[in-house]
Image (cartoon, rainbow, N blue to C red):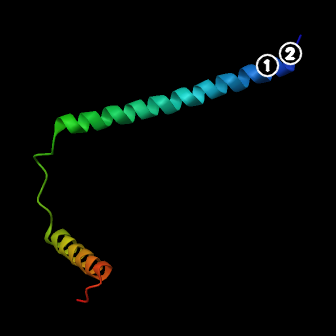
Amino acid sequence: MADPAAMLTLITAGTAGISITSAAALRGWNGWLDLKRMELAGPDRKASPPSPAARIEMADLKERVRKLEAIAEGIDT
């Protein structure tokens, strides 16, 4: 017969492992449900248009991407 202390340790470790696995699975399931809720809700119709500063920043980022693509293709700008 096995040592009672060893059995208690094994049972405790098993219970902790199952608890951690269950908590991770539940968190993943809730995240998946939130994603599906957002997909079903569709785009937010009340969203305000981007601010001028955000549009300027987006244009700047697009220009940087164009320059990097030109460098990658070996074309000097």
Q: Which residue does the image show at 40% across and 30% down from the upper left?
A: 29
**Residue 60 higher or lower than 42, as above or below:** below
**How many marks overall?**
2
Q: Residue furthest bottom?
A: 76
**Residue 13 higher or lower than 42, as above or below:** above
Q: Which residue does the image show at 64% across and 28% down from the upper left?
A: 17
Q: Which residue does the image show at 24% across and 38% down from the upper left?
A: 38
Answer few, some or many: residues within 10 Å of disc 1's Cα (few below 14, many 20 plus, some between 14 and 19).
few
Q: Position of residue 28 (x, y in %)?
A: 43, 34
What type is the residue that disc 2 sits on?
Answer: Pro
Q: Does the CB distance between marks 2 and 1 fall below 8 Å? A: yes
Instruction: Pick the quarter of the image with the N terminus.
Output: top right
Q: Which residue is mark 1?
A: 8
- For label 1, the SS is helix
What type is the residue that disc 1 sits on?
Answer: Leu
Measured in 3D between alpha carbons, the distance from the residue under mark 2 to the one under mark 1, in whole angstroms, is 6 Å
Compared across the picture, whether 32 is left or right of 60 comes to: right
Q: Which residue is mark 2?
A: 4
Q: Position of residue 10 (x, y in %)?
A: 76, 22
